[in-house]
Image (cartoon, rainbow, N blue to C red):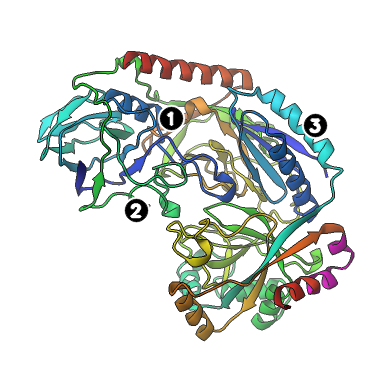
Amino acid sequence: MKTRYSFGGDEHIFVECDEEMSLQAFFKGLSITNGVRDSRIKGVTEICPANASFQIKFNPDEIAPDDLLAELKRIEETASKSVASLKTRIIEIPVLYNDPWTHETLMRFRERHQDPSSTDIEYAARINNLGTVDNFIKAHSGAPWFVSMVGFVAGLPFLYQMAERAKQIEVPKYLRPRTDTPKLTVGHGGCFGCIYSVRGAGGYQMFGVTPMPIYDPTQTISYLKDFMVLFRPGDIVKWKPIDREEYDQTVAAVEAGKFQPRIRDVSFALDEFEKDIDGYNRKLQEALYGH
Amino acid sequence: MAIKVHSPGLSTTVQDLGRPGYYHIGIPLSGAMDSEALRSANLLVGNDENAAGLEVVFMGPELEFTASATVAVTGGEIPPKLNGEPRETWTSFAVKAGDVLSFDFLKAGARAYIAVSGGIDVPVVLGSRSTYTLGALGGHQGRKLAAGDELPVGSASKSGAAGRTLPVSLRRMPGSPATLRMLPGLYWHRITEDAGKHFLADTWKVAPEADRIGYRFRGGQKLAFVDRKPPFGAGSDPSNIVDACYPYGSIQVPGGTEPIVLHRDAVSGGGYFMVGTVISADMDLIGQLQPHMPAQFVAVDMAAALKARKDQDALAASVRAALA
């Protein structure tokens, strides 16, 4: 894993922790960005962690680009000694797989897909050797997922499946991006899952929708009153497959201000997770559903 | 005081100088694409530089004022008319209750800025009045204007006099072809040396898909990639990377075909490689490019980028001095 620094014009430093995705690369970025935040470097205006990289926006009138670069490299050296762990939350997200809205949308954009004769979820099940859609849903909703980046559009989480690499679901993005994606679509591209926070363009395969808003610029939804964006990097997500009846009930409960998402505080330690992935995930689930 | 929207134009939005601080959760800067033009319009009418005005794209709105005010229109040449009578751009003029501001056809540039003494007084959201339409955030109800809207205008602490003009030498517009200086980097190493040469030598044309999120260019040669084994998580296309942050001004080239320069409403990250970043001093120019206009990317180093930034600051200082 070799850290690569590059200037993004005169206002950004872009730092790639690793070319390929891994939780090690994510945590390396997280510890450096935490170090940058704690250092309160004059002229740093935005700190944006990403999956296996991060970006610092700065004002070159306040700090010379080369000085900031040197400072980041110094922080990287200290950060590399830190332990990859964090105090975070596990959040249950209900999903209606194979829903009518993403189905209508994916049919409209079939000619942009690798396999126009099947649906996105059938295609993903097949190329991941899972046989049936039911098996795919089991695999998708079995292990929890790690929020390794928030962005693209407001509040959209990128989700990294907490499973050994051989078991991780991988799908290509659409051949050409769609111009439309339903709001709250559960999508997947490369090794990353996502939830589309708003309606708009997108290239990820579409598997279902959640009835649970994750971004609310009006800040009227009960659990988004304090801040309009639900997710932050490091959050852990557990999908819960639901049927149409529960979907409709949840939508109504959200509208009535009565829906409370299931969220529990947990801590996460990368070395323990890697020692026993299945065991660790079971403990996370117990924290989510236990009392 | 308010502004009644009779017709909205093509895509008119409330913008100030932007909403920094939330890019890490995908909420971009927003704000005027030609920031210096908005600054100038505000100073012409006696506002703070950062007051909210209206950004007009290609086609002007028709607006009625409910009280007296001073107004200025800057940026791209979309000639204003008051009650059907021509008014000068880059020059402040007085309006009174019942007056109607309309516009002639676009003559040059792409975006005009309308400032009104007192500023457009929509609610401040996360520190800014700018509209981020993709996220339905800020501005007037989080969207572009529609007929029938009524925009509140703040009370002017000091109204600028009518008839003040910004000298032509202080109005910055792109040339033809537009020259966009860029700092190569980010994933520049993904393309071959030959492709890098073509990218800089070719004349590109602004594609119809050009908006506040990004400007797409076409007409140059397809970029050839250096061979590689796709890194885990990136995707199989040679232009894919593990989804990462996108700098403002970064130039991504999906599939190696059409470069896209991200602007004020940028998507904050994604899975396409970038060849470099347009320097901060040239970002305003992009906001004034129309589809089909020719443009050329010119590679510069950091020293040149910082020098250009200083020049841009000096221009802003001259504008302030001229309108003090």
Left of B63 or right of it: where is B272?
Answer: right
Q: Can you see residue A29?
A: yes
Q: Which residue is disc 3 drawn over?
A: A74
Disc 2 residue type (three-letter) = Gln
* Residue drawn at (89%, 64%) of the image: A275
- Which residue in the protein does label 2 denote? B141
Relative to residue A277, is residue B294 drawn left or right?
left
Badge 3 crowding class, 10 Å Cα cut-off, few under 14, some 14 to 19, many 20 or more, is: few
Residue A95 image label: none
Q: Are marks 3 and 1 on the same chain?
A: no
Q: Which residue position holds label 1?
A: B284
Q: Report the magenta residues as a range.
A: A272-282
Chain at numbered mark 3 = A
Q: Residue at x 71, y 45 (%)?
A: A53
Which mark is first along the chain, 1 or 2?
2
What element does badge 2 sit on?
A: loop
Classify residue B105 by image quadrant. top left
Marks 3 and 1 sit apart, C-alpha to C-alpha, by 34 Å
Q: Are marks 3 and 2 in contact (CB under 8 Å)?
A: no
Give above or below for A85 relative to A54.
below
Secondary element under disc 3, as helix, strand or loop, is: helix
- Tag in front: 2 or 1: 2
The foreground one among A43 and B247 is A43
> 10 Å neighbourhood of mark 1: few (<14), some, or many (≥20)?
many
Is residue A18 something one can see in this rendering?
Answer: no
Tell me where residue A103 appears, x and y as whole percent: 50, 75
Q: Main secondary structure of the magenta part?
A: helix
Residues packed near mark 2 inside 10 Å, few (<14), some (14 to 19) or many (20 plus): some
